[in-house]
Image (cartoon, grey):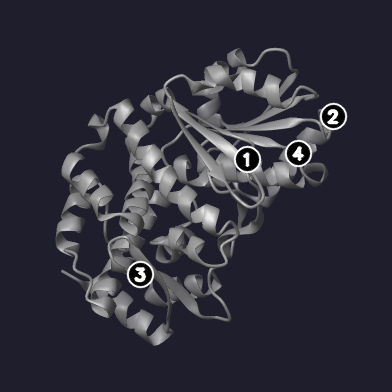
């Protein structure tokens, strides 16, 4: 088992990573929430079929309720959020209740927001079941989507703990492996050339990555995020670097329709674009061609979908929560491991996007 301690201004909490860490969940609850009145598990339809039984078997001595939501980004709507709150009230949860978020990033975002707002806040624990969730389960950003933008309605709400049972990753479909690994690549590029080289030199087939190696990579990614979040919990400065690839990535997700492309796959396209801009603006010493070839060999697309219009993508980016006073902010790299936050004018952005879409 691996353990990472995340220490922020508002809270410190452990992240447990390993094959059978759910064995430690009930003892943790008994030790830290002796007066817990009831546990609510929020999960999605896919995860419930695969892993709910494992979690239910691990919990002893507490009454448990389960609310199942749609899978993927369809969970992050006002309607589903409202229904979760209604269910919690109907089942008579109170301020001594505990919420468990069992699923990927979408479930974690939704459940964390439910926990933050139910009776002005109850504690919650993240039980991630995807690789992508190694990013979303740590750091305390919880939110739901709005038709005009991704994650527009939310708060900062740190979990009490994260139990990352890597044995659950064996059930992930290939598309989810791709989505999650995209965020691992992001953490490498913004932090450390050696981490990126390790990934590009050792991983040629995501289906062949062993569980223990996933544990190592997830721990490294979480430690990158921990370092940044501990410096800047609420994104006043360096935490914005974690948005590398996300400005265009979120725009692609919104324009495609949430759920039509996975978050990680959209972010990968956004990272290739940000790296391209970094080469032009900072003469970044990095081979976009080699990077793109590696990504394609892993099954990613590195191109903006042809039917998406540049003008519409720019409009989406203008609405992004990271934009200030209409200025579109991008995280670029002066070198691998050295990110910078840059305001990009719309004329320059349009020129770069057109060139990016038309590249051979």
- Tag 4's secondary structure? loop
Quadrant for the N terminus in the image:
top left
Which residue is identified by label 1?
159
Q: Earlier in the sequence, mark 2 or mark 1?
A: 2
Residue 302 marker: none
The quarter of the picture where residue 191 lies is bottom left
- Tag 2's secondary structure? loop
Residue 207 in the image: x percent, y percent? 26, 32
Q: Residue at x 40, y 62 (%)?
A: 244
Residue 164 in the image: x percent, y percent? 48, 30
For this orientation, the residue located farthest to the bottom is 347
**Does the rendering let one see residue 260?**
no
Which is closer to the viewer, label 3 or label 2? 3
- Classify 151 as above or below 122: below
Q: Earlier in the sequence, mark 3 or mark 1?
A: 1
Q: Please tell me how crowded label 4 is: few (under 14), some (14-19), or many (20+) other residues with Cα within 10 Å.
A: some
- Classify 200 as above or below 241: above
Q: How many marks on residues?
A: 4
Given residues 130 and 25, the one toward you in this image is 25
Residue 30 in the image: x percent, y percent? 70, 19
Q: Please tell me how crowded label 1 is: few (under 14), some (14-19), or many (20+) other residues with Cα within 10 Å.
A: many
Whole-number angstrom distance, CA of label 2 to CA of label 4: 13 Å
Which residue is identified by label 4?
122
């Amino acid at each position: 088992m691996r353990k990472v301690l995340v220490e922020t201004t508002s809270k410190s909490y452990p992240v447990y990573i390993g094959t059978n860490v759910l064995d430690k969940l009930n003892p943790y609850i008994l030790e830290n929430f002796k007066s817990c009145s009831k546990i609510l598990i929020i999960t999605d339809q896919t995860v419930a079929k695969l892993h709910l039984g494992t979690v239910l078997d691990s919990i002893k001595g507490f009454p448990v309720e389960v609310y199942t939501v749609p899978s993927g980004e369809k969970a992050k709507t006002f309607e589903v959020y409202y229904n979760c709150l209604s269910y919690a009230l109907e089942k008579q949860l109170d301020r001594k209740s505990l919420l468990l978020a069992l699923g990927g990033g979408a479930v974690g975002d939704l459940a964390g927001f439910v926990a933050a707002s139910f009776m002005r806040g109850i504690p919650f624990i993240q039980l991630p079941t995807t690789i992508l969730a190694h990013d979303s389960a740590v750091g305390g950003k919880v939110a739901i989507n709005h038709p005009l933008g991704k994650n527009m309605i939310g708060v900062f709400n740190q979990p009490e703990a994260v139990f990352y049972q890597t044995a659950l990753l064996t059930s992930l479909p290939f598309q989810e492996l791709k989505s999650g690994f995209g965020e691992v690549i992001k953490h490498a590029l913004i932090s450390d050339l050696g981490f990126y080289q390790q990934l590009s030199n050792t991983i040629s087939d995501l289906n062949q990555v062993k569980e223990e190696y996933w544990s190592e990579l997830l721990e490294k990614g979480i430690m990158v995020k921990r370092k940044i979040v501990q410096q800047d919990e609420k994104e006043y400065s360096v935490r914005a670097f974690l948005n590398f690839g996300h400005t265009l990535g979120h725009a692609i997700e919104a324009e495609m329709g949430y759920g039509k492309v996975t978050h990680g796959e959209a972010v990968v396209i956004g990272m290739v674009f940000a790296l391209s801009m970094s080469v032009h603006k900072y003469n970044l010493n990095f081979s976009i061609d080699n990077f793109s070839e590696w990504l394609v060999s892993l099954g990613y697309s590195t191109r903006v979908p042809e039917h998406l219009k540049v003008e519409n993508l720019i409009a989406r980016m203008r609405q992004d929560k990271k934009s200030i006073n209409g200025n579109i902010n991008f995280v670029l790299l002066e070198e691998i491991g050295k990110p910078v936050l840059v305001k990009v004018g719309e004329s320059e952005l349009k020129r770069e996007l057109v060139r990016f879409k038309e590249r051979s």
